[in-house]
Structures are given as C-alpha cells and as structure tokens.
Amino acid sequence: MATLTSRSLMTNDTIVLYRHDRFLAKTILPLIPKWVKPNHLTVLRFISIPFVAYLTWTENWAWLIPVFILSGLTDMLDGTLARVRKQITLWGTIADPAADKLLIGSVAVLFLAREISFLLAFTLVFLEFLIILGAYMRKRRGEYISANWSGKMKMLLQVIAIAGLIIAKLFAIAWLTPICVALIITSFFFAIVSLVTYGL
C-alpha cells in the first residue's frame, strides 16, 4: 500500500500555501472559472507538448513563443489552483511533474541542443532523468512526494530562460542569450537541491 505521509505528500488536509499562491489567488485565479480543475490544466500541458515539439522542430519561433509560454503558465497555475481550491489529487501530484519534464525535455533536445549548446541540453536532460529515477525508486517503495520549492524554482527558471532564448533567436537579440543560459545553469543548482532534498 502507498505510504502517503505528511512529510512526503501534500494533501487537501495538509495544504501549505506558498507566497506565489497567495499572489495568484488575488490576481489570476479569480479569472479561472470554478469548473476548471487543476488536472484540466495539467492535461492541457500534455496536449500542448506535441505542438511545442513540432513548432520547435520546424523552427516556427513566432508561434512557438506563445504556445510554450502558455504551456509553462499551466504549470504555475495547476499547482496553485489545486492548493488554493483544495483540489489536490494523487494523479495530479504524479502527472504534473511528468508533464513538466516532457515539456522541458522536448525543447531541450530539439532547441537547446541544436541552437545553443549540446552540453547544456545534455546536462538539463540528465538531471531531469535523475529526478525521474528518484521518483521511480520512491514509487517502488510506495512513496509519493509533492514538488518542493526547489523543484518549482527550477521549472520557473527553465521556462523563463527557454522562452527568452527563443525570443532572442526570433528577434536576433544577442545580449539576451547569455543571460538566459545563465538562468538555465542556475536551474541546475535547484535541480541538485531537489535531488538532495527528495533523496533516492
């Protein structure tokens, strides 16, 4: 039987709101209809991934930017929606990070490796693989762990950085590229913190 402890898994009875949850609860969340559930946003992110991959492969930067940013926003909103409205589910806890890794991983392989740096893309994908491996090993032990602050920060930095790199590519903004590369490298630190925090 799965071990669902308060240490490892946030439930609707043990919700802790983050600062960005409170901010979004007063700004964006009131615009989201009550019938929209957090899992709907996660599913939307899964659906968007093939479009993101196709637009990246075909180098359609103009369309890729809004589609990728929208997909990234669903990551920020689904977790907050779940916590604020007390709609946390085990499926969402598992599916949300899986969707994140598919989204970032596809862009890393198709964009970062080709346009920026193979080593950068490899490092990003390798760290994500280690996080997935850790999650798989915990699942084998019957444990499920909610994403922590370091994982959220990692994803936020990666979405901002990759969106910035695509914008730099589209509009030929040379100075933006090293800034975004630095953000991705910074995200590696938070990925490592996640690994250490979660443990294998």
Image: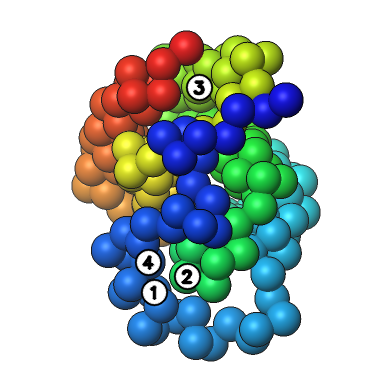
Question: Is disc 3 placed on a helix, strand or loop?
Answer: helix
Q: Are there few (<14), some (14-19), or many (20+) residues within 10 Å of tag 4?
A: many
Question: Residue at coordinates 37% horizontally, 66% vertically from top-left?
Answer: 21
Measured as percent of width and height from the top left, residue 104 is found at 55, 38
Query: Disc 2 vs disc 1: Cβ atoms closer than 8 Å?
Result: yes
Question: Is disc 1 placed on a helix, strand or loop?
Answer: helix
Question: Residue at coordinates 72% horizontally, 81% vertically from top-left?
Answer: 35
Q: CA distance from mark 3 to mark 2?
A: 26 Å
Amino acid type of the residue that numbered disc 3 sits on in the rendered structure: Ile
Query: Disc 1 vs disc 4: Cβ atoms closer than 8 Å?
Result: yes
| Label placed on residue 24 | 1
Query: Disc 4 vs disc 2: Cβ atoms closer than 8 Å?
Result: yes
Residue at image mark 4: 21
Q: Quadrant of residue 120?
A: top left
Badge count: 4
Amino acid type of the residue that numbered disc 4 sits on in the rendered structure: Asp
Q: CA distance from mark 3 to mark 1?
A: 27 Å
Question: Is disc 4 placed on a helix, strand or loop?
Answer: helix
Q: CA distance from mark 4 to mark 2?
A: 7 Å
Measured as percent of width and height from the top left, residue 50 is found at 76, 46
Using the image, determine if residue 104 lies above or below residue 120.
below
Residue at image mark 3: 131
Q: CA distance from mark 1 to mark 4?
A: 5 Å
| Label placed on residue 84 | 2
Give whichever of discs 4 and 2 has the lower sequence position.
4
Question: Residue at coordinates 41% horizontally, 35% vertically from top-left?
Answer: 7
